[in-house]
Structure formats: structure tokens, C-alpha cells
Image: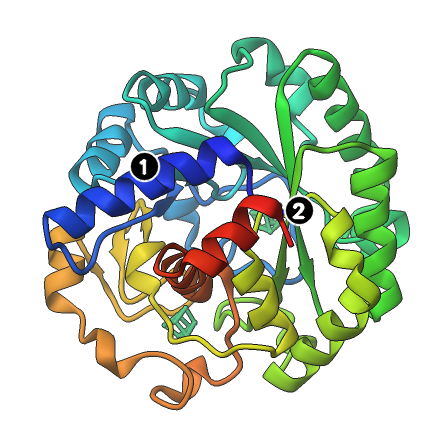
Amino acid sequence: MAMPMRQSVRLGAYLMKQKIKRVDKFPLLVELEPLFACNLKCNGCGKIQQPAALLKQRMPVEQAVGAIMESGAPMVSIAGGEPLMHPQIEQIVQELLDRNKIVFLCTNAVLLPKHIHKFSPHKNFAWMVHIDGLRERHDASVSKDGVFDQAVAAIEQAKKLGFRVNTNTTFFDTDTPQDVIDVLDFLNDDLGVDNMQISPGYAYEKAPDQEHWLGVEQTRELFRKAFDGGRRKKWRLNHSPVFLDFLEGKVDLNCTAWAIPSYSLLGWQKPCYLLDDGYVSTYRELIDETDWDAFGRGKDERCANCMAHCGYEPSAVFATMGSLRESLRAATGS
Ligand code: SF4
Ligand code: SF4
């Protein structure tokens, strides 16, 4: 099944508006990082390696909201670090909802029970809980025992209170197709989360574990086998069918990282969330000062193994919206 209808309709209207205005580069979703600090120390994390002085900083509410409004993006994914460690996180969320943004709040869920009373269910708001596998695999990924059980309990609590809850799962070269199937079956059928997002792991330069990232062929084989037999249709995946085809190697796409940019305490990151070629202070500068043709597989060696959501999901959305057949597939989840 494809992304939720509300999200697709909002995106469709937004894309139409950009087309009418003849804007060729615009954001679909901003990855907003209002802090880098976290209560966990995951092996694959490229954020918590920042200098101590930066880890202590928290982005002011006005700065976070101002950046999103300047960009014009209809969707915001608030990550970090652990956003629940930001003392005004509920204000940032509310200000964005008041401005009609679709907001995903990414969390490892450990602090969720302590802070959930500060939030209310909203049609444009969803928790995005980081779950990298079943109990043993997830706890190994976050380098701490007991976190999987805490995350599952927090998801159940949030669902009971009426929140939308999505999950985000990153796969590494130690995962088998059966691992993918087992975790998605669990999230979809047993836990009943609203939507699930999946990502092939990418080697951040700052991540301490540089050994277990997936290459392009490995990624394609992993997802081809996991999706085999039409299995992917039964999972409530928060991705367009074209992006899933891309993960399986059925189609290839060009990187359009300008459509899922990252804004953090350091500014707008060039050219994307995964690379670190400097920062600028506005989205406009990011667009104007980046040589977008220099990035993507075959162009920059750092992009060679990248099949990440931030570079290729927008390309899949553009392919979907530009084709009647793909739009019908997205609407029916086929
Ligand atoms: S929970 Fe997220 S931000 Fe925190 S250490 Fe893990 S990957 Fe990094
Ligand atoms: S291919 Fe990946 S790493 Fe390279 S610019 Fe695009 S999103 Fe960033």
C-alpha cells in the first residue's frame, strides 16, 4: 500500500502550484534538526559525533519555524539528535501545524512516555519511531538493551491515545530478506503502526561504524527478495510504488536531493543530509549556490552507493505525478 491519501493530495496540489509558477527546484519535505544531542549512541549515527559545544545547543523556535516558512515546504520531518530533548519541541510542532504543515516527529521513543502529554493528536501530525529490527537486532543497532521493548510500549501508548504512529527502519548489510520481512510483518500486523518507512543504510563520514553499509547491488537484491511474491503490497509503506521499484532495481532514478533538504543548527546543508560540503543560511542560497548536476551516482564518488530516501524519493514522487499510470498505481497501492 502507498503513502496516505491526505499526504498524496497535499503533495499533488503543491506540485501543481510549482508547475504553474514554473519553479523547477523546490522542497517537498525539510529534515529539520533543532539539536544534535541524543540520549542514545547508535552505531550508525552521524549526528552525535558533533563537538560538545554544538551538542549543547538548541535551535530557537522562531529560527526553526522561520527556516521552514522561507523554504515553503509542505512537510517537515523533525529529527536530531533526539527532538524530545529540546525544551520547546512541542512549540515548534504546534507553530508548524498552525501554519498547515504536515509534521513528522522522529524519535527513538525512549523519552516519549515522559513527554507525550505535551502533544495532541492532529490530522497533520505523526510520530516517526526509529525501529531497526526485532528485539535483538534493534537493541544491537542502538547499542543498548531494552530499547526495543521501550519503543514498542511507547508506540502502543501513543496509538491508544489516538496519535498517528509511523516507523522508520534502516537496513544494513547484516540484514537478510527474512529480517526485512519479519520486522515489517511485526510493525504492520502485530503492532499496527499507521505507516512504515524503510531506508538502505548510507555511510555517513562521521558515523563510527563504517563497515556495514549496503552497496547498490546488495540493496536491490535485499529488497527484491524481501518484496518477492507481491509481499510489499500488504505492508503500509510510506513510499510511492516507484521508490519501491527503485529499491528493487526495477527502475533507476536521478538524485533530486534539493527536494528533501536538511536544515540544522549549522544551517542548510550542502548538498544533502548525507554529505557535508558546507552550510548556507537560506534555502534560496542552497538552491542557487549548489552545483546540483555534480551529484548523484556516477557523478560524485561519495554518491556511488546511495539509494537514500532524501535523494531518490522525490525523484519517484515527480515520476509518479508526471504519469497517469503511476498516479493510479500510487492511489491504489499496486
Ligand atoms: S537515536 Fe537517532 S540521533 Fe540518537 S544516536 Fe540513534 S541514530 Fe543518532
Ligand atoms: S546521491 Fe545521495 S549522497 Fe549523493 S547527493 Fe544525492 S542524496 Fe546526497
Residue at 48% over, 59% down: 326
Q: Is residue 65 left or right of residue 233?
A: left
Say above or below: 115 vs 77.
above
Residue 221: x and y in percent read: 73, 80
- The numbered dot on residue 74 is 1
Where does the image place residue 174, in percent across and percent down from the top left? Answer: 80, 73
Can you say which quadrant of the picture contains the C terminus?
A: bottom right
Residue at 10% in and 48% down: 21
Q: Residue at x 23, y 74 (%)?
A: 292
Residue marked by disc 2: 1
Q: Residue 33's spot in the image, x, y percent?
A: 40, 43
Q: Nearer the viewer, residue 195 or 208?
A: 195
Tags 1 and 2 touching, CB below 8 Å: no
**Neighbour class for label 1 at 10 Å: few (<14), some, many (≥20)?**
many
Identify the amino acid type marked 1.
Answer: Pro
67 or 310: nearer the viewer: 310
Is 40 drawn above or below residue 114 in the view shown? below
In front of the other: 193 or 19: 19
